[in-house]
Image (cartoon, rainbow, N blue to C red):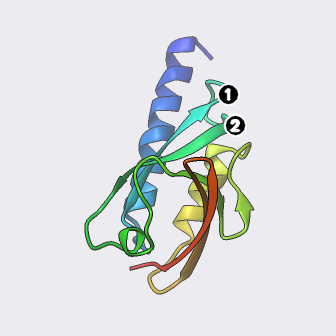
Amino acid sequence: MSDFWKKCLLILTLFVISISASAGQGRLGLTVAFTAQRTTFDARMDRLVINGVEKDSPAMRAGLMSGDIIESLNGMTVTGQSGRKLFKAMAAIRTGDSVRMTVLRGGKRLSVSMVAG
């Protein structure tokens, strides 16, 4: 596969993950971006960073902020996982589901819980 198509897949992956965190069956009200260690669709995530939190959303009520680094989602370690695995986990969240996250903020680890809207 050419470098052009690999870059296109990476951009598409970033877009899909961003949408999956803010839309879908269960809404958390946040968007994310990740830095990858490779340039393929299954790139390993180096860091998953929240880059937007919607007003009056479950994420805002849970205290999440732009710049928080997500370490785990419902017990699944995010760092080092593939973008495809995270997308699948986000897509499985339904309205009313409890969602647990561990985030890093300013070097401190925080645990947050929320109910998907």
Question: What number of labels is visible?
Answer: 2
Viewer-proximal residue among 39 and 103: 103
At 47% from the left edge and 87% from the top edge, which residue is drawn? Answer: 96
Give me the disc on residue 44: 2
Marks 2 and 1 close (CB-CB < 8 Å): yes
Residue under pointer 1? 37
Q: Quadrant of the C terminus?
A: bottom left
Give me the disc on residue 81: none
Which of the 4 image quadrants contains residue 42? top right
Viewer-proximal residue among 78 and 38: 78
Q: Tell me if residue 5 comes above or below residue 80 in the rendering.
A: above
Label 2 element class: loop
Q: Tell me if residue 101 comes above or below residue 37 in the rendering.
A: below
At 61% from the left edge and 35% from the top edge, which residue is drawn? Answer: 41
The kind of residue on which mark 2 rests is: Arg
Disc 2 crowd, CA 10 A, few/some/many (<14, 14-19, 20+): many
- Between discs 2 and 1, the one toward the N terminus: 1
The kind of residue on which mark 1 rests is: Gln
Disc 1 crowd, CA 10 A, few/some/many (<14, 14-19, 20+): few
Question: Which residue lies most toward the left here?
Answer: 55
Position of 66 compared to 3: left or right?
Answer: left
Residue 100, horizontal then vertical, whole percent = 60, 73
Q: Tell me if residue 27 comes above or below residue 12 in the rendering.
A: below
Question: Which residue lies most toward the bottom here?
Answer: 96
